[in-house]
Image (cartoon, rainbow, N blue to C red):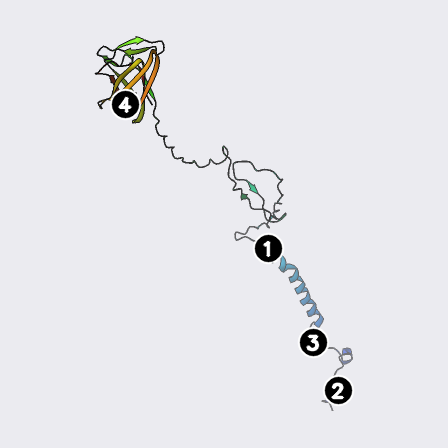
Amino acid sequence: MPNDPITDIRDPRHPLLHGTPELGRSLQPPAWAGITGLAVVILLAAIAIPPLISRGKDQRPDGSQARPPTATALPTATAPAASTPPTGGPSSHVGPSATVGGAPPIATPDRGTPRSGKGSPSPSRTTSPKANPPARFTPVTVQAENPANSLSEGALPVSCDTCDGGARVRYLGKVTVYLDTNLAGTRTVTVTYEIDGNRRIKVAINDAAPITFNTSGTDWEQPKTFSFVASIPAGRTAITFYNDEGSSPDIDKVTVS
């Protein structure tokens, strides 16, 4: 039977046993050739693609090649030597948290107060003016024989070795002594005189009514005093001595204190 399928089956292990193979089947490449070609393509892609990717990252928009970043060495913080910072200005120091080899330390200004004469001038201080001390009264002494005084009714200056200033006024009639005081107030008026015996003397301050005093002594060369308290104004004051009822003692000087 010519169409028996058994006779048409060829043994693939013995192609030559069945005569010359068909032309189309002989031209087909074997399976291993395709696998080998695919492997070659994958290998070439693995070699060529990474440089292209790297080149694309380094390519600038204008087509120039970007340089890879240069590694910059970080400064190394060094602990400062123990020393006193210069006076009068902010100084920088590394805080205790600085790490050697890490980020550069942050300079911290020294807020110490500058000493006088250096650095920032210290703010000026306003001092209130001191209150003027109260005026003090200055005692005044005037000699009775002073030419600026007024002598009348027979009064005359005479020499006196024991008198202050070397002279006194005698033979009263009347003598007016002028003196200047710097401050008004209640003052003590002291009159120095010489007398032998007992006599009376009247004293008037400016236009006030006179006051009468009794005086006594044993020697015309022996100074004696009497005192009284009176209100004395500031400025020029006139003190008048006289006795319109009899003789008066000799007047040496007048002191207001």
Which label was assigned to residue 235? 4
Which of the pair 66/105 is nearer the observer? Answer: 105
How far is mark 1 from mark 2, CA to CA? Answer: 65 Å
Which label was assigned to residue 55? 1
**First reached walking from the N terminus: tag 3 or tag 1:** 3
Q: Secondary structure at mark 2?
A: helix
- Residue indicated by mark 3: 25
Which amino acid type corresponds to the residue marked 1 in the rendered image?
Arg
How far is mark 4 from mark 3, CA to CA? Answer: 157 Å
- Residue indicated by mark 2: 7
Percent across and percent down for residue 205 are 25, 22
Percent across and percent down for residue 167 are 32, 10
Residue 31 appearing in the image: yes
Which label was assigned to residue 98? none
**First reached walking from the N terminus: tag 4 or tag 3:** 3
Q: Secondary structure at mark 4?
A: strand
Which amino acid type corresponds to the residue marked 2 in the rendered image?
Thr
How far is mark 2 from mark 3, CA to CA? Answer: 20 Å
